[in-house]
Image (cartoon, rainbow, N blue to C red):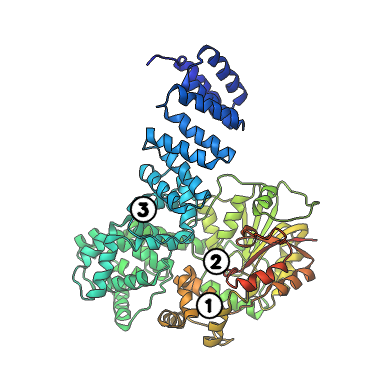
Amino acid sequence: MENVNPAKEKIAKLIDLINNAEYSKASYLSSQLLTENKRSYILHNLQGIVNLHISKYDEAILSFLEAIRLNKNFFDPYNNLGQAYFKKGKLDLAVASYKNALIINEKSHISYTNLAKIYYLKKEFSNSFECLNKSLAIEPSFIESLNLLREFLVLRLQFSKTNKNLYEPIIYLINKQPLVQPKYIAHSVVNLLKKDDDLIEIIDRSLRDSHSTQLIEDLSKLSNISLLNNFIRICTIPDIDIENYFKYIRYKILFYDFNEMEYIKVKPFFISLSIQCLLNEYIYEEDENEVDIINGLEEKICENINDDKYYIEIDIMKLSLYRGLQKYSWIDKILSRGINKEIEIIIKESFQEKELKNKIKSFGILNNRISELVKNQYEENPYPRWFKPTLLKKGISINEFVKNLGLHISDDYEETDSPEILIAGCGTGQHAINTASRISNSKVTAFDLSYNSVSYGLRKSIEYKINNINFMQGDILDVKNINKEFDIIECVGVLHHMENPKDGLREITNVLKKNGLIKIGLYSSLARRNITKFRNQYLNCDDYIDIKTLKSLRRVIISSSDDYSKNFTKYLDFYSSSEIRDMLFNVQEHTFNIREIEGLLDEMGLKFCGFTGFGNASDKSDSKFDKFNLINWDKIETENPDMFIGMYQLWCQKT
């Protein structure tokens, strides 16, 4: 073919200008070069790219079409033409362009991803997922594909068959890129795993033959299911079938006499199951036989701790399936002898939290009986346990933050360059860390009743190098003692656990600056009607539910034929001790309706600015519906009683 393109160094210079976003210079150079090389398909394509970047979409389309006319086998302009048509909103033409690109290069993960995104926008989800799957099979770590995969996985997908092509991308999504909190995709991941042929075979065999002698073979196969091992090390598994199997295999492991070679063969899954039990805070029930063996293990380890000939790791790992190792007095000696690095890290993290707890400042002394009860609950079960946050690589301003949420705030709201933010009731710090990374130049104060929860959050902030949070311990009722006013306050899932939520809201509103923004999360009476029914049936007001009773009541739910209680097993919170305690067995709980919240806001001088989560994102076909008038949501919720199933999450502004 005749060489119609300019010298390579001239093309390279033009590409450098485009890559450096010097579009004016790039436009001038491409036009100059085209006067000398009018039949250069490369130049026409590059000129189209320049026009695409400066939003001259019609000119870009003409350039790409000319590049294609000059060389019908040139891949790039087909793909770029699809982008130009997409920007113009001509989705069908964009689809045709990407399909033409794939005729030339069937291995283009970029074109498959672009197609997938368009089909997703057109709500052709089957076509979208098919294209996404092809893209991920070619390049599992392509960030745009992973972003779309995340959008699918949060929808609680139901897979019809195994799809191991997705294993590596999902592992990349949860381990390499902070794009999603694992709990939000847990149901989809579980559904995918339950279609895995090896897992199906192993679980079916355990159901058919509880005396199966294939333990080592099964554990070895489990060790080789990459997605299973990666996921259960960072997230609880919200599925009764898998839970029952994990209980079964844990029992088998406890009673099996491993030799060293067998242990090494099955060690990966052994470690994974140990971490899963730690994450769910040992929520699985134990029978008397298991308790006897555990007691024997504790004695054996203690008696032989100084015997170098004792291969201690197997017994330590067995014990770790049932008990937190950090509580034992001999744990320092275990660390000095060395076990597997994963368990060592977890133990060292718990020691770090104990050290950090001594450095946490308190701003008051508890004088409220309910606050004391709630504090004790979360000291025993810090909530929630989590491994990975969702961090933004670059923070945004408050104005951008408000715009992204779609809030309706007053015109006289003045943005500050360095906002003071309060997270009131920060739990284990996930909320505070996400907020601190999201809003630019923010200074975050985060506090909770529980020292153990706050020390967990402080350790995590150190781990992820989040340096703009001041963690403290205290009660909302004493928040004035911090001696600071705030531009933004977030208080989600806290007020409804107070003796008098109104008192708590008044205290935090008092430390909110005029025109400041506050996010409030409160339980919905309508959405929690079944939970209220359960609590009324099984709980007395002054009862403290210990862990043994909690497990027993949890078994009642699992075995129940009542639809209202059986439904609890669908929630991720059902699968760890701290989360189910928070969901069903909290020592104090209030619920609200829209009209009660409206009265609270009026009394506190707060103006409703919009819901997050459901409210603002809802697609209201009625253009007359005013979504910023809170009382309008009363009728909508009555018609859709589960719409605020988590809680009301509303933003307000102090007037």
- Residue 382 percent location from the top left of the image: 52, 69
Q: CA distance from mark 3 to mark 1?
A: 34 Å
Marking on residue 167? 3
Q: Amino acid at mark 3?
A: Tyr
* Residue found 45% across the figure and 73% down from its top: 569
- Residue 514 percent location from the top left of the image: 79, 58
Q: What crowding class fits label 2: few (fewer than 14 Cα within 10 Å), some (14-19), or many (20 or more)?
A: many
Give the number of the mark in front: 3 or 1. 3
Query: Which residue has dot 1 on it?
Result: 584
Q: Amino acid at mark 2?
A: Ser
SS at circle 3: helix
SS at circle 1: helix
Check the picture and name the quadrant holding the N terminus.
Answer: top left
* Residue found 63% across the figure and 64% down from its top: 447
Query: Which residue has dot 2 on it?
Result: 453
Total label count?
3
* Residue found 57% across the figure and 22% down from its top: 26
- Residue 140 appearing in the image: no
**Residue closer to the observer: 44 or 510:** 44
Q: Amino acid at mark 1?
A: Leu
Q: Earlier in the sequence, mark 2 or mark 3?
A: 3
